Image: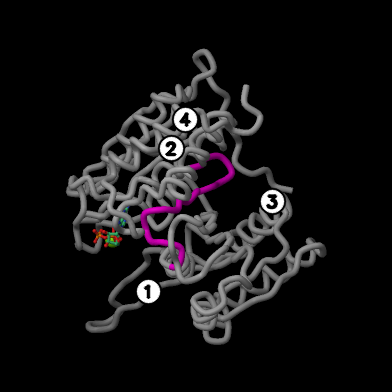
Amino acid sequence: VRKQAIIPVAHYGGRHLVTMLPGGGIGPECMGHVRDIFKYVGAPIDFERVDIDPTKDNDDDVQYAITTIKRNGVAIKGNIETKSEASYVTSRNVALRNELDMYAYVINCKSYPGVSTRHKDIDLVIVRQNTEGEYAMLEHESVYGVIESMKVVTATNSERVARFAFEYAKKNGRKKVTTVHKANIMKLSDGLFLETAKRIAKEYPELEHNDMIIDNCCMQLVAKPHQFDVMLMTNLYGSIVSNVVCGLLGGAGIFSGRNYGQHYAVFEPGTRNTGTAIAGKNLANPLAMINASVDMLEHLGHHYHADLIRRAVEKTINVDKVLTPDCGGTASSSEVVNSIIHNIGSGVQPFGSI
Ligand code: ADP
Ligand code: MG
């Protein structure tokens, strides 16, 4: 079995150095909230901040960011806007994921009782292929007025992400994996993805496996979301499905996502929004980035600090109900952060505290 992301060894007196890419829009202010909370709990993390300027035509910043992530092994990031519409300027976000070969993207979507939503008690996990498919960025105009866009599905990456999903399900006590596809139309590309998932499923007889066409999947999600447990899919379906699910559970501002490869891990808000329109107004929901920072602490083995922050977040959302307007509240970003810091300070004890 292939080893999952390797946790970097801490240097300098048990402290970890991680790359911080604030990104655009609400990214920098959300990173500020993470820093405040880490400072308050004394999380043993130092940040190496790299700013990427999306207006530049060269990708020197991106290359530098990649170098630091290769050195540190771990990063936390906000979304980088792709400002230029020139066809030769590709998304920095996609470039970063591809060059670091982070083939799996994972979002845990579990309802917070304090956020009022149409469906209650949803608990599902989206595992998305993260480096190819419809995001291959191979488009060209073959003859005038005819654009061709390549969707690339490889046996290797289909197998890696399928194995990741089944391993994740097994390790986390999940019962079922649903592979989402459009193999009835895209017979070769999605066909390969689906066949691979079916083959890997045979190695996990203890897990149920079924498959569902993407259009039906969207309808099932909004109507009967409780039937899903772990969901496995290609890149673009993953982007759409994760927005549907986050929308069902309270919006873009709450859940975090994890990019994993064999060597590196990058943590970010799950639906990867820039939030340009609400930037700098103390309006952004800080939870998605804070949850990303908790995932990062977990990945680095700092369970004590992760638990402290997670429990404080849960109390803020579910008990105190201090929420920003995007998920039904009236609080500002900083009121949410202050509530979390207050809850950490008032001793919401994590399990297994030291
Ligand atoms: P844009 O980049 O055009 O500003 P996005 O695609 O980033 O928008 O986000 C989609 C929608 O979700 C927008 O309405 C945005 O304001 C909202 N949104 C995204 N992230 C957050 C957040 N953290 N808090 C509140 N609203 C958010
Ligand atoms: Mg956007």
Q: Separation of disc 2 and disc 4 at Cα?
A: 8 Å
Q: CA distance from mark 1 to mark 2?
A: 31 Å
Badge number at residue 5 = none
Mark 1 element type: strand
Label at residue 149: 1
For image coordinates 52% across by 33% down, the residue present is 348
Residue located 44% across and 69% down the image: 244
- Predominant SS of the magenta segment: loop
Q: In front here: 65 or 155?
A: 65
- Element on which disc 4 rests: helix
Please name the amino acid that badge 2 sits on.
Ala
Span colored in magenta: 248-265
Residue 104: % across, % down: 54, 54
Q: Amino acid at mark 3?
A: Asn
**What crowding class fits label 1: few (fewer than 14 Cα within 10 Å), some (14-19), or many (20 or more)?**
some
Ligand 1: give its quadrant.
bottom left
Work out whether mark 4 precedes mark 3 in sequence or the reverse, and give the earlier one. 4
In terms of secondary structure, where does tag 3 sit?
loop
C-alpha separation, residue under disc 4 versus residue under disc 1: 35 Å
* Residue 169, image quadrant: bottom right
Q: Please name whichever residue, 120 or 154, is drawn nearer the observer in this view of the structure.
A: 120
Identity, as a three-letter code, of the amino acid under mark 4: Asn
Give the residue at mark 4.
Answer: 72
Disc nearer the start of the sequence (4/1) = 4
> Is the C-beta of the residue carrying label 1 under 8 Å from the nearest atom of ligand 2?
no
